[in-house]
Image (cartoon, rainbow, N blue to C red):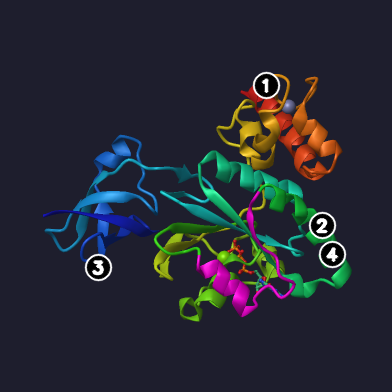
Amino acid sequence: MIKHGRIIKSISGFYDVIDNESEKLVRTRARGNFRKRGIKPIVGDMVAYDDSGDLGYILELLPRNNSLVRPPIANVDQAIVVTSAVEPKFSSNLLDKILVNIEHNDIEPLIYLTKTDMIDEDAYAKISEQLEGYYEADYVIFDDKDNYNPQQVQRLQEHFADKVTVFTGQSGAGKSTLLNHIDPELAIATAAISQTLNRGKHTTRQVSLFEISGGLVADTPGFSSLELIDIDKDELPTLFPEFVKYSSECQFRGCRHVNEPGCKVKEMVDSGKIMKSRYDNYLYFLNEINSYKKRY
Ligand SMILES: Nc1nc2c(ncn2[C@@H]2O[C@H](COP(=O)(O)OP(=O)(O)OP(=O)(O)O)[C@@H](O)[C@H]2O)c(=O)[nH]1
Ligand SMILES: [Mg+2]
Ligand SMILES: [Zn+2]
């Protein structure tokens, strides 16, 4: 019989699918013709599958709303960008790059600051200052000094219902640890980063979706660097929400906010309304995109 469901886990050629109707977990394989067509099912994919045999067979992937490459996952509504204060050190450049990639895929980013217990008040004040600009971009931010305080964890969980949420961010930032705080029964393996670096491997190797607070939440392998895939220089300014707020007041339509006269965005950077580091990172990414063009 042909049924429908969502892939929540993929292990060595098998795909675990939650059936839409029965909500039961079914182990499946993908038909060989997927590989021939160059299509690979990924976690989050909605599928049609046949469950007549011992093992289900994925017959078809339904069209994706969106999909990420790093981490590989489809049909995501929102992303919790787990960002550590130290180990690995807070980097506005990497944070902005992650945010730009998420915005590009029409996924809503939320920012969660971890390891605040490992820094003193001064260092915390500095990071808080760096996070100011993200409030101006209207991002939802979790940056309590006591980063696992139950109210804040609760506030995060309230965003999960009826959505697919992905935890993403640098390796060692504390994605799996945060998920374990949310639901201790998950008992996901975590490791100190020095250990991670020694092994040259990431602690979380696979994307898997868990049912938490009425939604599906994915832990994913972290990364140490990221490329701006498929983003062109005309799209880039639209991926900074606080630029979009003011760009209609720029003198020129399609203003890239670089050297154009009468640029409202640059005026807002000068007045401090738009954070300088966000703008600098924008220019940096613009350069990076131009350098990809030269490379290919
Ligand atoms: N002190 C402190 N340690 C933390 C915090 N969050 C995570 N850690 C530690 O940081 C290390 C890395 O945490 P993980 O949760 O494994 O990090 P991850 O983001 O899942 O890493 P990958 O799976 O490699 O992407 C572990 O030793 C955790 O115990 C925190 O808020 N405070
Ligand atoms: Mg992990
Ligand atoms: Zn402008």
From the viewer's perspective, is residue 162 above or below residue 59?
Answer: below
User: In this image, 179 relative to 44: left or right?
Assistant: right
Q: Are marks 3 and 1 in contact (CB under 8 Å)?
A: no
User: In this image, 33 relative to 112: left or right?
Assistant: left
Mark 4 or 3, nearer chain start: 3
Q: What amino acid is found at the position of numbered circle 4 in the picture?
A: Ala
- The local crowd at label 1, few if under 14, some if 14 to 19, many if 20 or more residues have their Cα within 10 Å, is few
Residue located beneath label 1 in the image: 294
Spot occupied by residue 116 in the image (x, y as percentages of width and height): 75, 70
Where residue 24 is drawn, which disc sits there? 3
Which quadrant holds the N terminus? bottom left
Q: Is residue 140 magenta?
A: yes
Instruction: Give the alpha-carbon distance from disc 4 to disc 1, as whole Å.
Output: 40 Å
Where residue 129 is drawn, which disc sits there? 2
**Range of magenta residues:** 138-158
Residue located beneath label 4 in the image: 125
Number of the front mark, 1 or 2 = 2
From the viewer's perspective, is residue 27 above or below residue 230?
Answer: below
CB of residue at label 2: within 8 Å of ligand 1?
no
Element type at marker 4?
Answer: helix
The answer, for residue 189, to whether it is visible in the render is no
The answer, for residue 55, to whether it is visible in the render is yes
Number of the front mark, 4 or 1 = 4
Element type at marker 3?
Answer: loop
Q: What amino acid is found at the position of numbered circle 3 in the picture?
A: Lys
Q: Quadrant location of residue 80?
A: bottom right
